[in-house]
Image (cartoon, grey):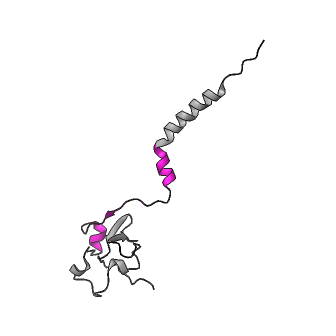
Amino acid sequence: MAHHVPDNSRRRFIKLTAVGLAAAPFANALLSGGTARAADLISETDPTASSLAYVADAAKSDKRKDATALCSNCGLYTGKAGDASGPCAIFQGKLVAANGWCTAWTKKAA
């Protein structure tokens, strides 16, 4: 009498396919790891921005004492030179205008 071996490869394929389909929505989050995501420009009316007297146009600030002080030359600004906006360590997850200013401005180390 011939011994019948169950077809485990088909069952295994179906199980793996079901698990793969269930995990697919989470794959993008898991695989994107350190990639940057798009951020919004912070509003001057944002509570944190308002408390630090943030303005998107530094020339419009009456609290700024150094005429050369801009977000783009602040030690907390991590945007690229020449970009219109970039991330700031103070406003986590939001972008600030490169030509902006706030009271947290500190001179960028050389």
Identity of the residue furthest to the bottom in this view: 66
Which residue corresponds to the image point at 24% horizontal and 67% vertical from the top-left? 45
Quarter in which the N terminus is drawn: top right
Would you say residue 84 sits in the magenta stretch? Answer: no
Which residue corresponds to the image point at 51% horizontal and 51% vertical from the top-left? 30
Which quadrant of the view contains residue 69?
bottom left
Between 50 and 60, the one nearer to me in the picture: 60
Q: Position of residue 105 (x, y in %)?
A: 35, 80
Q: Position of residue 106 (x, y in %)?
A: 38, 82
Would you say residue 31 sits in the magenta stretch? Answer: yes
User: How many dots with numbers?
Assistant: 0
- From this view, report whether residue 108 is shown above or below residue 86: below
Which residue corresponds to the image point at 41% horizontal and 79% vertical from the top-left? 75
Which quadrant of the view contains residue 47?
bottom left
Q: Is residue 96 left or right of residue 7?
A: left
Quarter in which the C terminus is drawn: bottom left
Q: Is residue 45 left or right of residue 4?
A: left
Q: Which residues are magenta?
A: 25-52
Identity of the residue furthest to the right in this view: 1
Q: Is residue 5 left or right of residue 76?
A: right
Q: Position of residue 85 (x, y in %)?
A: 33, 70
